[in-house]
Image (spheres, rainbow, N blue to C red):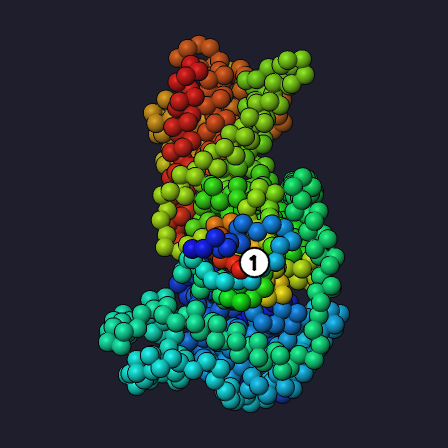
Amino acid sequence: MPVSQRLKIAFVGNPNSGKSSLFNHLTGLNQKVGNFPGVTVEKRSGHSTLQNGSVAEIIDLPGIYSLYPRSIDERIVSEILLDHKADSCPDKIVVVADATNLKRGLLLLTQVIDVGLPTVLALNMIDLVAKAGISYDINALSNHLGVPVVPINARNGAGLEELRNVLSNPLENPAKKIFNVYNEAKDAVKTLRDQLHLDNDYEAYQFLQQPRSLGFITKENQNFIEEVSKRYNFFPGKFQGAETIQRYTFIQDLLDTVTLKTSDDSWKRYSSKLDKILVHKVWGYVIFFTVLFVIFQSIFAWATVPMDFIDGLFASVSNYLSGILPDGLLTRLLTEGVIPGIGGIIIFVPQIAILFACIAVLEESGYMARVVFLMDKIMRKFGLNGKSVVPLISGVACAIPAIMATRTIDNWKERTITIFVTPLMSCSARLPVFTILIALIVPDQLAFGFFNLQGLTLMGLYLLGFAAAMLSALVMKYIIQVKERSYLLMELPAYRWPKWSNVGFTIVEKTKAFVFEAGKVIIAISVVLWVLASYGPGDRIKNARENVLEESANLRLTEQGLDDRIAAYKLENSFAGIIGKGIEPIIRPLGFDWKIGIALITSFAAREVFVGTMATIYSIGSMEDQTTIKIRMKEEINPETGGPRFTPAVGFSLLVFYTFAMQCMSTIAIVYRETKGWKWPLMQLAYMSVLAYVSSFVVFQILS
Amino acid sequence: MSEGNKNVAQMKPGEVGIIAGFTDEHLSVKLLEMGCLPGAAIRFNFSAPLGDPVCISVLGYELSLRLDEAATISILT
């Protein structure tokens, strides 16, 4: 069957209704994550085979409480459900409701029913309902609502056969209307229906209620709707509260009829006991910071083993291929540009997988909501969200998974600020640069008898990054002006054991998203950087060996020493070298020479490349160990002063530069992917570069 | 407003009240959707360690909201 004729089924439901569990269960690994056209909202879709053998396309829409959206994510759902003329309009809708908390789920259901598309109610967590001692008359519920009702347990798959069955059979539009448009709006609704050829009253009523936030309405029609509104004395949002109350009244009456047995909430007792500890004044924070520490440790420590393995693997593949393939441009492009580029993407996979495993557990168990609860007051002061804590702390290991983790923040402004400031947290790639420079300029001595000076400096740099992140967030809070008001209004779900397959799905999904979307940008930049560092104008690179031999004819170099000199010569005469020399006047006020300039350019791929480039440029490329590099850097003389090149002023200036500068193409790629455009990554690059430059300038000028 | 008027932000842990109405029209629409209905029972569970946000029970589930949001819900006691 052609894709366009496939049955399109949309899943709608409250956050925490178990919608995603159901989606995972029905689609298995046949899912893909994309974006809705034009917006950054994640679109999860997949396909599933129904009872009659036909394949249906399933879309998992963002969790919402009502068709009146609170955020951009939620707006998508209203747009998809109300745009009946679009190709994306679903053929069938499954409303997933948490059966232990049915009233709120039914509010959404009654709105969806009134939209007039074929609808099924999936009554999820039916196991918990039984445990809680609640009992519903499912048939009566279905009769009163006018839609099929299927009790399910999305965790173990109970009831899913029945749901598939219902979905594979023809489904009528809902038989009933729950809400009747108020008399005051009837004329306006009729005018709209006639003029815009709408399917039913509630659809037209929604057009009147929110003409500006439904993106598919053309400018012309928006003006028309507003004119009609004016004519009939209507305005967006009028009666919205009254509508909600009317719906809840209907729901209360309905539940009074169909509930056979109610619960005394005693099933939630253990959850509220847990809350006594987990949001306790002292223990709450102790436990939270322990959890953060465990997450941080696991990405920092556990990920290094597979990362070293991946690093080694790609190096040997490169070596192997350059051994068997004929030497030439293509071979070098492959072994020095493309394969290390791919390696540079895959190397992040362990960190991404571990961080998202942790985050999925926090979300699934219900603890994430408590994190927000604990941190909201502090983070809000800085324009951030309670959920920003996890990305910020993860940023100390690596900004890539951290920025991907901001997806959990619903509010656009708070999410953007979090993305913007997270790279200022000192990541693990800065560590090699920090350690070598600190070893170079800070004496290995104790201060006050027991503080190691080098350790103190390192800690100071981490704190500096953290302070810069928080202060930048604070500034952005006042710069970014949005109409979207910041709410909390968040459910604190009862604690549950995480479902491990959902954790697995999250890992697969995030890893795929990174490798395939950010990966493209990373490959492109690494190939460009490779070309810059390997080629130069004229014949100088080609004749490197002869030129170096000529220059150092009387130096009696070993073969190794000669190779190192050739490598340095090549780098110096490459495009990167020329750019490095070209920017020397700009970076001189920071205390940097052209050799450092070259390292700044090459380490744009990743900060840790700084160390390798310094080794190459000082002709010690073959001895890439810290001590050798340190000693060589110590010996480097500044020809202008006659003293050492790496004075404390230069060293601290470089340290501050690397604390603030973006210097990471993978971060740029992931910010591009997460914000769906070049605006934010480029602003971030500019901001961090300026911040780094100015701070280094100040540090160097004060110290020298 | 008479003396008996109180809002959710002034409640103490464990206290129960009946929602009387809202003071912020914009926010009231959201609160209604979340099940804070006039006439419904509301229980103040606990506040976060820094006093803000707070957790209430309404409509059979636990809802957290900021103190300034809670202050817009007036209650009868």
Instruction: Give the amino acid type for the residue marked by disc 1 in the picture.
Output: Thr
Q: Is residue A9 above or below residue A584?
A: below
Between residue A321 and residue A87, name the one nearer to us. A87
Q: Is residue A82 left or right of residue B65?
A: left
Q: Residue at x 38, y 33 (%)?
A: A690
Q: Is residue A598 above or below residue A637?
A: below
Between residue A322 and residue A673, name the one nearer to us. A673
Between residue A87 and residue A531, name the one nearer to us. A87
Q: Is residue A297 above or below residue A187?
A: above
User: Which chain letter goes with mark 1?
Assistant: B
Residue A377 x/y as whole percent: 53, 44
Residue A441 visible somewhere in the drawing: yes
Residue A375 x/y as whole percent: 57, 44
Q: Residue at x 39, y 83 (%)?
A: A201
Q: Residue at x 46, y 10 (%)?
A: A643
The residue that label 1 is drawn on is B77
